Image (tube, rainbow, N blue to C red):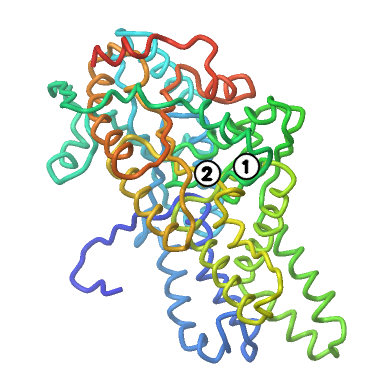
Amino acid sequence: MLIAGYDHIIFDTAPTGHTIRLLQLPGAWSGFIETNPGGASCLGPLSGLEKQRQQYADAVTALSDPDRTRLILVARAQKGTLDEVARTHQELAAIGLSRQYLVINGVLPEREAMHDALAAAIYRHEQEALAAMPDALRNLPTDYLPLKAANLVGVEALSSLFSDRAEAAPVSTGTFANPIDLPRLSTLVDEIANTGHGLVMMMGKGGVGKTTLAAAVAVALAQRGLPVHLTTSDPAAHLTDTLSGSLDNLEVSRIDPQAEITRYRQHVLDTKGQDLDAEGRAMLEEDLRSPCTEEIAVFQAFSRIIREAGKKFVVMDTAPTGHSLLLLDATGAYHREVTRHVDPHMHLTTPMMRLQDSERTKVMIVTLAETTPVLEAAHLQEELRRAGIEPWAWLINNSLSAAPTSSPLLKQRAAFELTQIEAVRTRYATRVALVPMQTEEPIGIERLRNLVEPQNAPDLAGAARTL
């Protein structure tokens, strides 16, 4: 990257787990080259990588220098988000990134809490989360940014981000279809349950609620008496925290990269390495210490889990968009390599073929009714279609337009949602469900069940007419 002539370079990084992995890579490759100067890696002979050694060293030095690098952690005023940011803070500090700052974004102003139960609940939960902020974050320099009425897209909107003034933009719904006419999540879960088994994959950008909705769908299926395996490939996801309990028919797991690397290395040594002499085995062990061994190990774990979908439901909370696409790239590469070397008359089912089978796999794209999440979801859908995978449904999460509110700020945000909801309904999705903003954070079996099948549904149609 050319940096001459710039006073500041700002990186918008990938979500938590993968950013940590990215920041660890320069040091990992530098260390690998140091200890294996004459070996090879999954990227080829190290003689080529050796030429980049100084570049890796410079990257580590720059990232660890508090006078050159400032890392800003961004969070919402929510317990789960703050807990994740605290873990991120500690992991980054452990690799030398000590100059960290914290920004709490999108905080509902106190004045909105007096208008209705939803606004009051949002404000209360945010203040409780901030009061219980993990100790690891309390000493960081912190700024708080208020929730804005409109999506922050465009120079004019972005220039208002740091303003504390109250907004009074007019509420206008335009001429859009009523979003309340869209089905709820329970309708889609009923359709999924009728198939008896299969793979359900939640995909989308970071922060849209994939983990929560994956857990909610898994709980709903399990409570219908169906065997379900709920798993995640997102390094930052914590399904057990979201479930906060156990349930009959529900198995929960996580693809842990470190555990999978250990498993993969041992398998390769036990198979390919069993007949090697000492020198050959040493060279194989060097190759298995390559940082990109993780990608192979995670792919194998992914393949192993989705095979279970032939007998039960497997609900997968995937990593955010970009990294899920990398996993799909690996799946596609494996498919092409395998099919190239087998007899065309031989019956074969690769992981990619399972993903492309709409009878066995249902990809659900999760988004918010905001410009950037919808555009990124649309890009994800294009990439999936290029891979021969047709998304089954879209889920619009945390919708204010589907929740009753008289808060002026929340009503303005609800009105702005309608354009994006209409775009999803008419341009992108063959199936779409709307998940309302909740008055209680959906943590625990009962609240997750209510997210799918609310026991006391409000008069949402009446709420929509007040926008």
Question: Quarter-wise, where is residue 242 in the image?
Answer: top right
What label sits on residue 147 in the rendered view? none
Residue type marked 1: Val
Task: Indicate the quadrant containing the C terminus: top left, top right, bottom left or bottom right.
Answer: top left
Element under label 2? strand
Which residue is found at the position 50% from the left and 40% from the top?
210
Residue 359: x %, y % from top left: 59, 48
Give the residue pinned by disc 1. Answer: 315
Q: Is residue 349 above or below residue 444?
A: below
Locate residue 407 relative to residue 224 in the image: left or right.
left
Which percent across, then down, holds residue 429? Answer: 38, 42
Q: Quadrant of residue 433?
A: top left
Which mark is first along the chain, 2 or 1?
A: 2
**Closest to the observer, 360 or 58:** 360
**Mark 1–mark 2 CB contact (< 8 Å):** yes
Horizontal and vertical percent for residue 72?
38, 48
Q: Secondary structure at mark 1?
A: strand
* Residue at screen point 31% across, 16% down: 110
Disc 2 residue type (three-letter): Met
- Residue drawn at point x = 31 percent, y = 73 percent: 1
Residue 456 place in picture, x, y as percent: 50, 9
Which disc, if any, is residue 202? Answer: 2
The answer to whether 38 appears left or right of 3 in the picture is right
Left or right of 169, for residue 279:
right
